[in-house]
Image: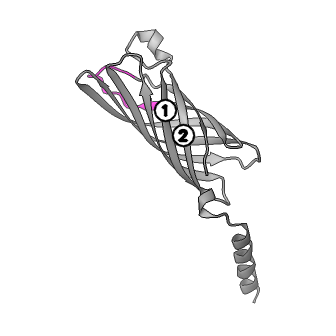
Amino acid sequence: MRRLVFVLGAALVLAVSAKPVDAQLKFAPHVAMVSGFADAIDNTLGLNGEFGVGARLGLELPVFPIGVYAMGTYFFPADAEVSYYTASVMGKLGVPIPIISPYLLGGLQRSATSLGGLENVENGVFVGLGVQISRLFLEGSMEFIEDDPSLPDFDNDPIVFKAGFIIG
């Protein structure tokens, strides 16, 4: 009898506290800036100071401060012949504080760079920290990209800063 009362009570609490699905799905356009300090050291063609735009789509659990996101960013290098974009899958672990919520993020990333007829696709991981203030988010992440020694090094394990607005 105790178990039945406990199960019914737990089901009632979950039913009352459940959010609609649209509050769990998150869409966020963002802007990004690359800050790769290694460019100045070895004079390789880098993306230091370049801007990009992108978006992310994610699912966050209503009871726990965790989420899973897919995201893409296209950068606009100053050299018109260079093209650079990234696609990522990441996890987010937040601290459930109202108004200002810090969080950790980490995930897998695929980046593609093309210069002239030469294309370079790299895979790697990234980790970072962020803060969400109401619907605005600001984050910084360090990318650890697997480099191909036979091709020019475009990214130099950059630090990327992103800011965006959450819809949903």
Q: Is residue 73 left or right of residue 148?
A: right
Asked if residue 61 shows in the view, the reply is no
Residue farthest to the left, as pictured: 117
Decide whether the magenta segment is chiefly helix, strand or loop: loop
Question: Does the magenta-highlighted stretch encompass residue 144?
Answer: yes
Q: Is residue 18 above or below residue 113?
A: below
Residue that carries the numbered disc 2 in the rendered image: 29
Q: Amino acid at mark 1?
A: Val
Measuring 30% from the left and 29% from the top, which residue is drawn there?
Answer: 120
Residue 24 colored in magenta in the image: no
Amino acid found under the numbered disc labelled 2: Pro
Q: Label 2, label 1: how many angstroms apart (C-alpha)?
A: 8 Å
Q: Judge whether residue 146 can be spotted in this image.
A: yes
The disc, 2 or 1, on the residue closer to the chain's N-terminal end is 2
Q: Position of residue 87 (x, y in %)?
A: 42, 40
Q: Residue at x 27, y 28 (%)?
A: 119
Residue drawn at (72%, 50%), measured in percent from left and top?
96
Relative height, residue 124 to residue 75 (above, below): below
What percent of the width, then of the height, locates residue 111? 38, 34
